[in-house]
Amino acid sequence: MSVTPSRVPVTVLTGFLGSGKTTLLNRILSEKHGKRIAVIENEFGEVGVDHQLVIGAEEELFETNNGCICCTVRGDLIRILGQLMKRRDKFDYIIIETTGMADPGPVAQTFFLDDELKNQFSLDAIVTMVDAKHFLQHVDTLNEPAEQVAFADLVLLNKTDLVDPATLARIEARIRGINGTAKIHRTRNADVAIDQVLNVGAFDLQRALTVDGSFLEPEYPFEWGGVYTLAAGDYLLKTGGEHDHSSHEHDLHHHEHGHEHDHHGHDHAGHAHDDLGIVVLPLAAATPAALDSAVEPAVRTFAEVSMEVACHGALARIPGHYEIDVSHEGADFKLTIAEAGAYALFCEHHPDEFALRLEGVVPVAERRFASHHHEDDISSIGISDPRPLDPVKLNHWLDYLLKARGQDIFRMKGVLNVKGEDRRQVFHGVHMMFDAQPERPWGSAVRMNSLVFIGRGLDRAELEAGFESAVAK
Amino acid sequence: MAAKQSLSFALEPRATVDLDDYVIDCAWGRDGTSIAIAGGEGKVALAQVQKDSLALDVIGAHLMGTLNVAWQPRADVFATSGQDSAIALWDGKAGKEIRRWKPAPTPTQSLGFSPTGEILASAAGKVVTLWSASGEKLHAFAPAATSAVALTFDRPGTDLGVALNGEIAVHRVENSRYETRRYKWPAAALTVNFSGNGRYLASGMADGSLHFWNRSTAKDSQMRGYDGRLELVGWSDNSRYLASSAGNEVVLWDFGGKGPEGTRPIVLNGHTERVDSFAWQPGGDHLASAGRDWRLTLWRPAKAKQPIDVQMLDSEISVVRWSPDGKRLAAGEKKGRITLFDLVAR
């Protein structure tokens, strides 16, 4: 496929009900930016600004002819885009707004359907708005919020003024756990500079893939570790205490919507985080280096049988592996330190998700680890490996992977070091529809494969074994 | 020589006129003295056709784009639909808007008159509605499961075919009976084409297949191998050939003898870019095709697989339409030019 400079960039704007999509659209359309923007939206009559084109669409899904049930595109969109191209006063930009309950997959996949579409439009980015006020309530009970985050290249964390900083940190940690590559911008009232939302270039194969390093690491049984200097005595490990009654009414409304659309009947109890695995270890010193050296012992301790600790219970033994009950907000656990010194705490999930902290002390050093997740949960997995790949074996692997797991893999992107090829091979995909092409030469840069998969129930071992099978011998 | 004589037709340009808009479609008036033109940015224009001239008047608009234009048979009225969700009726003699209404919040994707001109059918989103020639609602069909992409009446006007995702719905409209037959195929139908002899119903599909059903037995036959979505399908006037194109070639299926099953199609090679429009000559056997290579190409497939004439126009050609008598042809371009040709013996 050749890259035509005149391609019209397209942003897919998604986000759960009430997250602020319409506010953002109104803002974009009314701002003086000199761009002619066409908006395609499913809900009528909410947005309307003179001289900007707002087109109503009836969400009409159909499967492509490759026999894969996850290859679904939007028929209405194909027609509307075709119609838009019949204007000589071309639009500079197209924004497609999905409904709050929509899966952004089919919209994004539409742009991979054929050369005709690929030559005329360039999918710029999938932007997902997240309602900070309600995200944590929704993400554990409904499929859509996590899926929308999983598809995102850019997450606009909106309504940040309605929650406290600790909750924001929890939300960001949760978003990171789902999608390790998306950029996150915090906004209030959808107030964000237009150039931060449009022309992001997330699907631009000519741009180097930027990947957050932390999730390219091997997977640890913990997401966070910190080291503290502690005097002898009793300490309380506490979870967040704020309890938001005002939001419950809205919540009910959203739940009703959710059940109607919850086709998967998915049980999310698995990641409601009732119990949190933690490990406490003594350390030689309260330094980052000492924390790094404690990683291996921490992995071993996590492998030991855990002690369950109820709310207000005691963490009696050090070193020790505990499952603490964090199902209630404001829970606390007593940690007794017999001997003053340096101690490390490792947590299965990021403590920000629970506003978990050791009362009265702050960590001297801390470190994040590759996201840990449960079976069936949505997460990102990265593979980073310098060994050159065999193009034929690579094709076999990707072919197999997409056929077998295409439905679960929402997004896939990568830069590949292919044997005998001087240029970087880059690819980008949505479910099993993807686009790949050679990019600029490696030159003197270190040749390195970087792959990222975002999806449901991804198995790192399976992905790594597949990658291994594609390494050139 | 006799063989050569049969090929001796060509197109001769007679007049051009420029519409300051992308020519989406055009429709000839019943007596061939006017052409209604739909512009992609919204213009609605009327061209008066003389022997060697075209006089163009922009007579109105659809905000944000005109989608369809259809001339009412046996009358001097034409209808348009637009991105503004409106349908408008126009006086094709006086060049004046008669009536405008919004049948649905979604734009009317397809529009067509019955052969007698008594019924105007429109498809907006999932709803197909029948209107009287003056725009009074006659009947609205129950919403379909998916959007209606195209609709057309059969030649007697007894049935209305609607292209949907997964089926063609054929509504009996004769005597207001409104029974529906469904011809199913699990892909999005993009066109609906009744053969003039009434035997077949054909449809181009989004999965790159061409289907035709024998209307009396409902037997489905399909042709595969098109390069992507098949959006151009058309029967020759005598129902002998079914033309189709999803790329640079025009593929013809011959329904003479036992029909096309098991046969190879006639492939018309002459375009170097995608074909965006073709039209069979009314009352004749010429086929005009045109598209992105700026070439207006004339074929007579019953006689030759090579073009019998090629005219190079001024930009990409979006639409070709024969006059009702089959003696003249209008070609519209993406840059807005409309050119009038005569079919002449060489």
Image (cartoon, grey):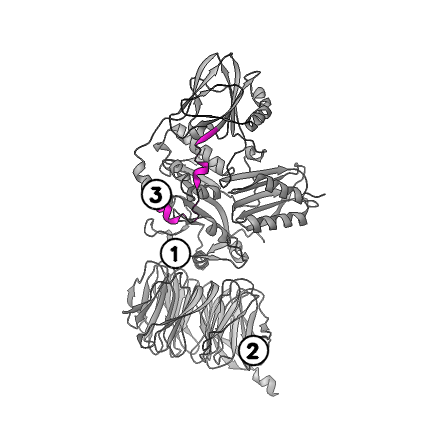
The residue wearing badge 3 is A254
At 51% from the left and 54% from the top, the residue drawn is A71
In x, y percent, where is residue B307?
58, 75
Residue beneath the point at 37% across and 49% down: A260
Q: Give the Cα distance between marks 3 and 2.
A: 61 Å
**Residues at marks 3 and 2, common chain?**
no
Residue type pointed to by label 1: Glu
Q: CA distance from mark 1 to mark 2?
A: 40 Å
Placement of A29 over or under A184, stated as above or below: below
Which quadrant is home to the N terminus of chain A? Answer: bottom right
Please determine whether, in this image, residue A49 is positioned above or below residue A80.
Answer: above
Q: Nearer the viewer, mark 3 or mark 2?
A: 3
Residue at mark 2: B301
- Quarter of the image where one finds residue B142: bottom left
Q: Nearer the viewer, residue A79 or A61?
A: A61
Viewer-side label of 3, 1 = 3
Left or right position of A288 against A394: left
Disc 1 crowd rating (10 Å Cα; few below 14, some 14-19, many 20+) is some
Q: Dot 3 lies on which element? A: helix
**A429 magenta-colored:** no
Q: Which residues are magenta?
A: A256-276
| Dot 1: chain letter | A
Q: Are marks 3 and 1 in contact (CB under 8 Å)?
A: no
Q: Is residue A418 left or right of residue A248?
A: right
- Identify the residue at the far bottom of this view: B2
